[in-house]
Image (tube, grey):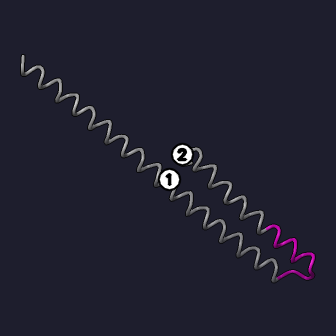
């Protein structure tokens, strides 16, 4: 009977360890995806900034320069919103 009790607790311990390992793996995947979303946001933000600078440099008048600046800012906000949405889907916030 002692052997049965020992094997049952051993199985329980293994199940807990397996669940803990799966939980750790899940948290690691979420964190990795969160870092990826932040990296993607940074790259999109940089892209928007460069595009805005180029468009402003090519602008023929103040109106075009202003429009280019607004478009760049819009792209930056969209990048931040997309990253935040991804993180919300992952349950990071």
**Mark 1 secondary-structure assignment:** helix
> Where, by quadrant of the figure, is residue 72 drawn?
bottom right
Residue under the point 67% across and 59% down: 80
Q: In this rendering, is residue 90 above or below 76? A: above
Residue at 67% x, 70% y is 47
C-alpha distance separating marks 2 and 1 = 8 Å
From the viewer's perspective, tell me whether residue 39 is left or right of residue 29: right
Q: Position of residue 43 (x, y in %)?
A: 61, 67
What stretch of residues is rendered in magenta? 58-71
Q: In the rendered structure, does residue 53 fall within the stretch colored magenta?
A: no
From this view, report whether residue 27 is shown above or below residue 37: above
26 on left or right of 88:
left
Q: Tell me if mark 1 has few (under 14), some (14-19) or many (20+) residues whose alpha carbon lies within 10 angstroms of its own.
A: some
Q: Secondary structure beneath disc 2?
A: helix
From the viewer's perspective, tell me whether residue 71 is left or right of residue 3.
right
Looking at the image, which residue is at 32% across and 40% down? 20
Q: Are marks 2 and 1 in contact (CB under 8 Å)?
A: yes
Callout 2: few (<14), some (14-19), or many (20+) C-alpha neighbours within 10 Å?
Answer: some
Task: Give x and y (percent) for residue 75.
Answer: 74, 63
* Location of the N terminus (image quadrant): top left
Q: Main secondary structure of the magenta part?
A: helix
Percent across and percent down for residue 45 are 66, 67
Q: Earlier in the sequence, mark 2 or mark 1?
A: 1
Which residue lies under the disc numbered 1? 33
Apparent side of residue 89 relative to residue 69 in the rendered image (left or right): left
In this view, which residue lies farthest toward the left?
2
Q: Residue at label 2?
A: 90
Asked whether 65 falls inside the magenta stretch, the response is yes
């Amino acid at each position: 009977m002692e052997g049965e009790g020992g094997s049952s607790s051993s199985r329980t311990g293994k199940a807990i360890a397996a669940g803990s390992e799966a939980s750790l793996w899940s948290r690691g995947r979420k964190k990795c995806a969160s870092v990826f979303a932040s990296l993607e946001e940074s790259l999109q933000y940089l892209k928007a900034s460069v595009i805005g600078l180029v468009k402003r440099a090519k602008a023929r008048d103040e109106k075009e320069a202003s429009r280019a600046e607004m478009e760049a800012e819009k792209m930056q906000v969209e990048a931040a919103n997309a990253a935040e949405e991804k993180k919300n889907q992952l349950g990071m916030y």
